Image (tube, rainbow, N blue to C red):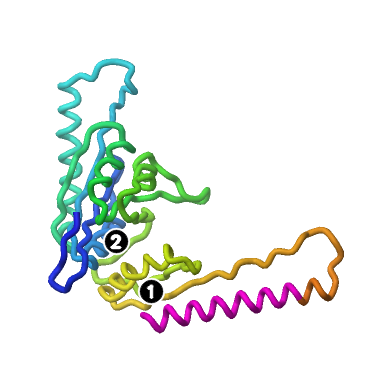
Amino acid sequence: RTTRTSNGNSRSDVLIFVDDTQEETSALRHAQRVARAFQGSVTLVHVMSDASNHNGPIDPVDWNLKKQKNMKWLTGLAEAIKGHEQPCEVKLLEGPCIGQISALMGQRHRDITAAIRSRNSLGWQVSKTACGVLEAHGAAILMIPEDAVLAKDQHYRRIMVPLDGSARAEAALPMAIMLANAEKAEVLLCYVMPEPGLTEFGVKDSEAERLHELVVKRNRQAGEVHMARIKNTL
């Protein structure tokens, strides 16, 4: 689903998949900021799965009440954030969480799928919703830390783009530039030199050390030339 804006750029909408535990809205503003950079809209999406785990038939009355409750909660989230950047739509899906996310994003290859990720001292915690977003191959992915607060008048200062010398990595550059232009931010190109491999066993002699230094020097020069080429292109 691709549309062209007046300046010829591709428009991308952002679909934010949220769990029913989501109450805080400050992290959602990151998705709004990204949508504005790509001249798209924002849609809050929640997937209702069968809580009975297929152990028995679903009570249609109870299910309908849950749908109404979830829609009210989802609409409340949208109302809370729409005044900060742009209007926000809502969408309620029913069925297996990961399957519903994959199916929807399979139809929207040019859009961005986003999810909130929780983190603590043990590291990233992945919910079923976040897992579904990570497995959705039909769209770009935006993972937002739940504690990543973004004030209304705050802008991104720096956009880091990791590169490894491949065309696949460089394919992210146009989107990074669009976001940086919209935010008046600096683009930081990042390349990590690979470790030169030498066998762990054997005697370390002067020849081995010389070869190691030559490989390190060669890798550094190649990386600098590659980064300079991209910088000049940009």
Question: Seen in the image, is 147 located left or right of residue 110?
Answer: right
Q: Which mark is residue 158?
A: 1
Tell me where residue 72 appears, x and y as whole percent.
Answer: 15, 40
Give me the disc on residue 146.
none
As displayed, is residue 20 above or below residue 178?
above
The magenta stretch spans which residues? 211-234
Image height check: is 226 above or below 43? below
* Screen quadrant of the C terminus: bottom left
Residue 191 placed where, x, y %?
Answer: 51, 71
For label 2, the residue is 30
Number of marks: 2
Q: Amino acid at mark 1?
A: Arg
Task: Check the image and report above or below for 211 versus 142.
Answer: below
Q: Viewer-proximal residue, 60 or 101?
A: 101
Q: Mark 2 belongs to which amino acid?
A: His
* Quadrant showing the N terminus: bottom left
The residue that appears at 41% across and 68% down in the rendered structure is 170
| Mark sitting earlier along the chain (1/2) | 2
Secondary structure type for disc 2: helix
Q: CA distance from mark 1 to mark 2?
A: 14 Å
Q: Residue furthest bottom?
A: 232
At 48% from the left and 72% from the top, the residue drawn is: 190
Q: Position of residue 115 (x, y in %)?
A: 33, 50
